């Protein structure tokens, strides 16, 4: 994490990424991207066409990323808890990934080549911790000032 750049970079990833909920598979792709940013485990973003039609709905709420722009949140249809987010109108540097979706591994089951991703600490963060990334990570106790 500490050798990840600032500003973050987008790296294509060809591993099979799946996202599932109690109601079944939400998304599957072998062409995700990882956003690598200093002190954070990578966040995987999936292309919109990898999401099963009608499975996600926009829910109230938004946030702002200094690198990507204004985010909106999505939930599993029939629920209200956000399980992911996307940037419908991102800054130029992230424009190629408009509407690509990232998911919270603490709210849905996210796997990378079959390995279950563990959530980044702190309810706001959406990093995916797998065996190939090593912390400490922002979001853990004592890291709010990083």
Image (cartoon, rainbow, N blue to C red):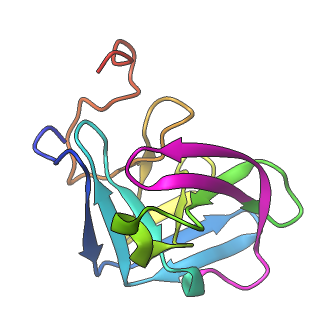
For this orientation, the residue located farthest to the right is: 78
Q: Nearer the viewer, residue 58 or 96?
A: 96
Q: Looking at the figure, which quarter contains the C terminus?
A: top left
Q: Is residue 56 magenta?
A: yes
Percent coordinates x, y for residue 49 in the rendering: 58, 87
Q: Quadrant of residue 68?
A: bottom left
Q: Main secondary structure of the magenta part?
A: strand
Residue 16, located in which quarter of the rendered image?
bottom left
**Where is 51 relative to 61, above or below?**
below
- Left or right: residue 7 versus residue 35 is left
Q: Is residue 34 magenta?
A: no
Q: Which residues are magenta?
A: 51-74
Question: Viewed as shown, does residue 98 lie left or right of 114?
Answer: right
Residue 102 vs 30, above or below: the answer is above
**Residue located at (77% from left, 47% from top):** 81
Q: Which residue sits furthest left? A: 3
Snapshot quadrant of residue 15: bottom left
> 56 or 95: nearer the eye?
95
Residue under the point 68% across and 55% down: 73
Residue 23 spot, x, y in % from top left: 77, 68
């Amino acid at each position: 994490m500490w050798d990840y750049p600032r500003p973050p970079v987008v790296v294509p990833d060809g591993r099979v990424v799946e996202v599932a909920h109690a109601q079944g598979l939400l998304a599957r792709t072998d062409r995700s991207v990882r956003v690598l940013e200093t002190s954070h485990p990578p966040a995987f973003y999936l292309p919109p066409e990898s999401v099963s039609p009608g499975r996600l709905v926009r829910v109230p709420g938004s946030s702002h990323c200094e690198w990507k722009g204004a985010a909106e949140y999505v939930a599993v249809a029939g629920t209200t808890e956000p399980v992911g987010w996307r940037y419908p109108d991102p800054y130029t540097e992230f424009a190629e990934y408009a509407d690509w979706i990232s998911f919270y591994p603490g709210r849905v089951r996210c796997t990378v080549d079959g390995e279950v991703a563990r959530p980044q600490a702190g309810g706001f963060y959406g990093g995916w911790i797998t065996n190939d990334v090593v912390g400490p990570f922002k979001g853990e106790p004592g890291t709010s000032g990083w």
